[in-house]
Image (cartoon, rainbow, N blue to C red):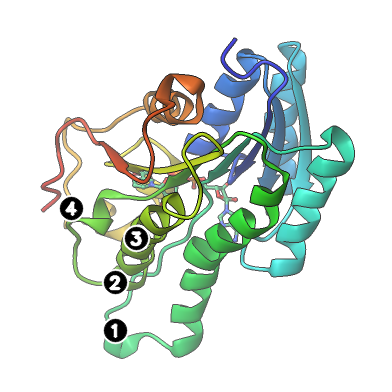
Amino acid sequence: MRFDKKVCLITGAASGIGKATAVQMALEGGRIMVIDRNPEKGQQTVDEIVKAHGTALFSQADVGKEDEIKAAVDLALRQWGKVDVLVNNAAMMTFKKILDLTAAEWDQVMAVNLRSVFLFCKYSIPHMKKGAIVNISSVHAHESTANVIPYASSKGAMEAFTRGVSLEYPHTRVRINCVAPGAVDTPMLWNNPNVKDGKEKTTGEVGKPEELAAAICFLASDEASYINGTTLVVDGGRLDIL
Ligand SMILES: NC(=O)c1ccc[n+]([C@@H]2O[C@H](COP(=O)([O-])OP(=O)(O)OC[C@H]3O[C@@H](n4cnc5c(N)ncnc54)[C@H](O)[C@@H]3O)[C@@H](O)[C@H]2O)c1
């Protein structure tokens, strides 16, 4: 039971990789705060965990909004009094070339994908005695396609942020790492117009959400006690996405 009684905050846990991670951590004894902007699907994740005799609560939050992030952390603290694990997983994409992109669209991607990671860390770390943070990046931080520049930039910055935060705390107090998925079988992949029209290839190399959850749970667990400030690419070896 790697997460026995541990308080685990997971954003974007209503679907895909976040949901698979929530279910796995709950199976291993974690108390899960399912954080998502989608209340119906978020509640479904909670119901599945509770049905399997796990512990979970839903907190509706748009991670682009600071007051909603703070409220989600506060709810976990009121319920369980601490934070042990934080998984920053919620994200969004745009599909426009930069000349067609507005400043508001750029700011929105940065708020949801990057500023949220800073704010969840800012509000959670003071309540972590021995915490582990896993930020969900993407292979796009390393090798990207045209028309997803805000997304790729936010993920590249997330990896730099992660390395920086790892220097601010001893690894025995807070560890922080990234997982960078390749193509994973979730709504986000199949709704991506670059995937639909074949610009971004996925043939034969699509991972399952549970395969990502396994890597995230490893980095969030004490098994990874000496791993800090790095990125684990989990892509079936497909980093070349073009
Ligand atoms: N699926 C892939 O192929 C793939 C590849 C690389 C990286 N990733 C990354 O994995 C993570 C999870 O993606 P997924 O594929 O599981 O997606 P998904 O669409 O299955 O789930 C994303 C969840 O995030 C929630 N969400 C989105 N914006 C939000 C916001 N502003 N506030 C709160 N919740 C919000 C959605 O409601 C949804 O429940 C993302 O960070 C994504 O960038 C996914």
Distance from disc 3 to disc 4, alpha carbons, whole Å, reads 30 Å
From the image, tell me which residue sits under label 4. Answer: 198
Note whether residue 158 is visible.
yes
Q: Residue at x 76, y 51 (%)?
A: 72
Q: State which tag comes first along the sequence, 2 or 3.
A: 2
Q: Is residue 94 left or right of residue 233?
A: right
Q: Position of residue 62 (x, y in %)?
A: 67, 61
Distance from disc 1 to disc 4, alpha carbons, whole Å, reads 21 Å
Q: State which tag comes first along the sequence, 2 or 1.
A: 1
Q: Residue at x 29, y 84 (%)?
A: 98
Q: Position of residue 15 (x, y in %)?
A: 56, 39
Q: Which numbered marker is on residue 160?
A: 3
From the image, tell me which residue sits under label 1. Answer: 98
Q: State which tag comes first along the sequence, 3 or 4.
A: 3
Q: Which numbered marker is on residue 149?
A: 2
Note whether residue 187 is visible.
no
- Residue type of the residue flagged with mark 3: Ala
Q: Residue at x 36, y 59 (%)?
A: 155
Disc 1 and disc 4 in contact, CB within 8 angstroms:
no
Disc 2 and disc 1 in contact, CB within 8 angstroms:
yes
- Residue type of the residue flagged with mark 1: Ile
Above or below: residue 226 compared with residue 78: above
Q: Residues within 10 Å of mark 4 (few under 14, many from 20)?
A: few
Q: Position of residue 116 (x, y in %)?
A: 57, 62
- Residue type of the residue flagged with mark 4: Gly
Q: State which tag comes first along the sequence, 3 or 1.
A: 1
Secondary structure at badge 1 equals helix
Secondary structure at badge 4 equals loop
Task: Judge depth for marks 4 and 2 and give the one in front.
Answer: 2
Q: Is residue 222 left or right of residue 80?
A: left
